[in-house]
Image (cartoon, rainbow, N blue to C red):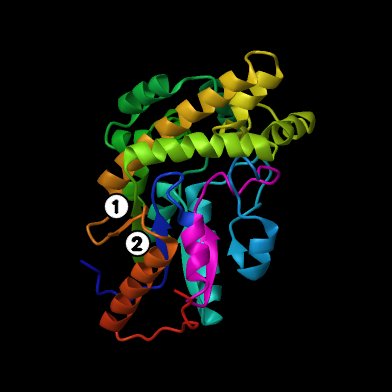
Amino acid sequence: MISKLSPTFIALTGPTTSGKTQLSCALAEILEVEIISMDSRQVYKGMDIGTDKVPDDVREQVPHHALDLVHPDERYSAGQFARDARNWIKEIIKRDRVPVLAGGTGFFLKAITEPVFSEPPLDSTRLTQIRRYLSALDYKVLAKWVEKLDPERASLAIDGGPQRMSRTIEVALLTGKPLSSWYRESPPDVAALNGLIIQLELPREEIDKRINDRVTYMVERGLVSEVRSLLEAGYTFDDPGMTATGYREIAHYLEGGQTLEEAMEEIRRNTRRYARRQLTWFRNQLPPSVCMIDATASINVQAKAVLDAWIEIREQAGLQIRRVEPSL
């Protein structure tokens, strides 16, 4: 069922390797679009191969946003994305184009489809100390901390991964009040936006196969050299960007802690776990109006399905669309 509220964007989401980027570029052949990356790792400069960013020649053909925004030692929150993305969406619409958000970071999507609240100010010195401590903890330990400090938000934070869990812990420890309370008691700064949300579906065995192939391809493209360059530039495991899957494992290899094949297998294993967390998040957090598309279908069939859904939702709102002649 498609929402009847006025839509302002198309969002393509789904588990890693489901083909979101490819589909977004295919849409550019039938609609006047600009693409906003919805990947929390692609915001980092110098992290191209391991985050599977679109190449420069594609960016020259189709405008892309939310790429290469900050350095690996800087944080870029979902709240910041919410504000930036609203500005991009506003400007794209002014240019009479369709904003297409593409990526698998669920919290970035949620930051668009729900109101944005201001988080409390935190003491920077103590925050740095806490972050250094939390960065050394594994996933299960972080989850236990979250469940104890903010049980109301625990499920959402745990599904969001280590960075989201760390933020929940930081606020609770430094303010004495859980983040869920801050959100509940604070008025929203920015209203929610409505759009067409597409989820790409893949069988788990196909996800696993694509993950295996992608890791091999990333190493062939030069992932080891990319990680080596980041380490030589002075970035460390404590930096937000360097926590991304693929970077720590290769860094461990470069330090002599394991063979390259062992590092590659660890990347595959950790990526499979991440994909499972994504699927759990989508199942629990996406709205009932989400449109499901079979990601094993041809890219032309997928693009046609998105176009049909976009036409329907726009017609329901009494709006028209601009499109280029389809090459399907």
Residue lying farthest right?
A: 232
Residue at figure coordinates x 31%, y 24% from the top left: 148
Residue at figure coordinates x 36%, y 33% from the top left: 158
The disc at residue 263 is none
Q: Is 245 located above or below residue 294 in the figure?
A: above
Region of the chain picked out in magenta, as a range: 21-47
Question: Which amino acid does the dot numbered 2 rest on?
Answer: Ile
Query: Residue 55's image quarter?
Result: bottom right
Question: Which amino acid does the dot numbered 1 rest on?
Answer: Leu
Q: Is residue 324 visible?
A: yes
> Quick one: 44 or 53, which is closer to the camera?
53
Residue lying farthest top?
A: 257
Check the picture and name the quadrant holding the C terminus: bottom left
Q: Is 208 located above or below residue 306 in the figure?
A: above
Question: Residue 90 in magenta?
Answer: no
How packed is label 2: few (under 14 Cα within 10 Å), some, or many (20 or more)? Answer: many
Residue at figure coordinates x 28%, y 31% from the top left: 151
Residue 27 point in image, percent of width and height: 47, 69
> Quick one: 130 or 185, which is closer to the camera?
130
| CB under 8 Å between discs 2 and 1 | yes
Residue 322 point in image, percent of width and height: 46, 84
Residue 227 point in image, percent of width and height: 70, 32
Residue at the disc numbered 1: 286
Indicate left or right for 128 with 56 as reference: left
Check the picture and name the quadrant holding the N terminus: bottom left
Considering the numbered disc 2 on the image, is that residue within a helix, a strand or a loop? strand
Q: Is residue 114 visible?
A: no
Residue at the disc numbered 2: 197
Q: CA distance from mark 2 to mark 1?
A: 9 Å
Q: Earlier in the sequence, mark 2 or mark 1?
A: 2
Residue at figure coordinates x 49%, y 19% from the top left: 137
